Image: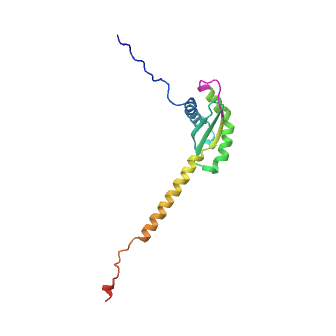
Amino acid sequence: MAGKRRSTRSSTPKYSRSARVSTTLQEIIADDLVRIDDERLTFVTVTGIDVDPELNRAIVFFDSLADEEGDEEILKAFADHRIRLQASIAKQIRAKKTPILDFRPDMVIRSAARIDDILKSDRARLDREASDDAPTDEPLSTDADEG
C-alpha cells in the first residue's frame, strides 16, 4: 500500500513576520484615523509602515493633500494621538509587545510625484517645440518658381 505524500509546503505565508505586522498595523491605524475626530488628520493617508524585526519600533509613513506645508500640524496631531493608536493596536494584535510608533512623511511618494510633474512639464515643452518646428501649409518657393 502506497503512502500519501506529505506536502512540503507550509500553510504559513512566505513573507516575514514584520511584513505581516506592518500590514496589520496599517489597517488598524487607517481604521482609527477615520474614527479620530481631528481635522488635522482628515486628508491623511497611511502609505506604509516599516516595523523592525524585534517589533520595538514602527515607522508610519503618511501623505496628505496638504503636502509638505501640512506636515508640521499632522505630526503634532499624530503625537497627540500616538498613545491612543498604540492602545488600539495592543487590543487588536496578538503580540507580546506593541511597537512604538514613529510618524514620518512619505518622501518616496512625494519624490515620485515631483518626478512625474517634471516629466509631464518636459513632455509639454517638447510638444510645444515640435509644434513650433512643424511645417506650415504655405508652399516653399523654389528657384524654378522665381525664374
Q: Residue 120, position in %: x, y?
A: 49, 57
| Farthest-out residue, bottom | 147
Q: Quadrant of the C terminus?
A: bottom left
Between residue 72 and residue 106, name the one nearer to us.
Answer: 106
Q: Residue at x 43, y 21 (%)?
A: 7
Snapshot quadrant of residue 133: bottom left
93 falls in the magenta region: yes
Report the colour scheme.
rainbow
Q: Is residue 114 above or below residue 20?
A: below
| Farthest-out residue, top | 1
Q: Residue 19, position in %: x, y?
A: 55, 33
Snapshot quadrant of residue 39: top right
Q: Which residues are magenta?
A: 91-100
Q: Is residue 139 above or below residue 64?
A: below
Q: Residue at x 52, y 31 (%)?
A: 15
| Farthest-out residue, front | 2
Q: Residue 31, position in %: x, y?
A: 56, 34
Left or right: where 95 falls relative to 122: right
Assign the magenta stretch its main secondary structure. Answer: loop
Left or right: where 105 falls relative to 7: right
Q: Quadrant of the N terminus?
A: top left
Left or right: where 34 falls relative to 77: left
Q: Residue at x 56, y 29 (%)?
A: 17
Q: Residue at x 61, y 29 (%)?
A: 89
Q: Residue 26, position in %: x, y?
A: 57, 35
